[in-house]
Image (cartoon, rainbow, N blue to C red):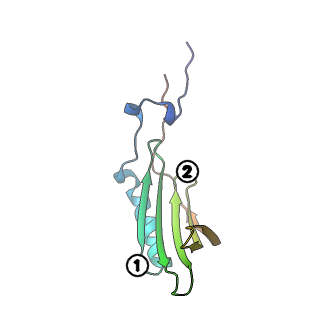
Amino acid sequence: MSQQHLSPEQQPSSQRQIPSIEAIGPVVDEVIDIARRELKHPIKVRLWTWEDREFKVRVKHWYPAGANNRYGYEAIIQYHSDREVVEGFFAERDTETDELEVLARTEFGRIPDPVEKKRRVV
């Protein structure tokens, strides 16, 4: 009988696992610390987790559009576990169409993904 590796999407839902906050908390804290040093305040933090055990943390500061201008700006620090890189972006957002254009990109270093991703064997 041959063994078959299943992708997380192919696994029964009972075998999928969203990463725990205990596992990813230190990475989230480190990204927030970088953002506190690099961004103006106030900052907003968003966290995404997926059943394939990947996660993303984004911290941003919004510069609103002026009275006679439809463009606002976002300064963003972001980490996605699949790339293991902390990146910074400065972007222009059209407040009428919600389109976002990245104007500048910076890398702030690498953080190893703390979540072990095991492939199930059937």
Residue that extends furthest to the top in the rendered view of this protein: 1
Residue found at x 51% / y 53%: 81
User: Residue 56: x percent and y percent?
Assistant: 48, 56
Mark 1 residue type: Pro
Circle 2: is it few (<14), some (14-19), or many (20+) Cα within 10 Å? few
> Could you tell me which secondary element the residue under label 2 belongs to?
loop
User: Residue 14: x percent and y percent?
Assistant: 37, 32
Q: In this view, does 85 lie above or below 49?
A: below
Residue found at x 40% / y 44%: 18
Mark 2 residue type: Asp
> Could you tell me which secondary element the residue under label 1 belongs to?
loop
Residue found at x 55% / y 77%: 73
Residue found at x 57% / y 72%: 93
The answer to whether 5 appears left or right of 55 in the picture is right
Q: Residue 42's mark?
A: 1
Which one is nearer the viewer's eye here, 67 or 8?
67
The residue under label 2 is 82
User: Residue 119: x percent and y percent?
Assistant: 50, 33
Q: Residue 81's mark?
A: none
Q: Is residue 89 above or below residue 2?
A: below
The answer to whether 54 appears left or right of 103 in the picture is left
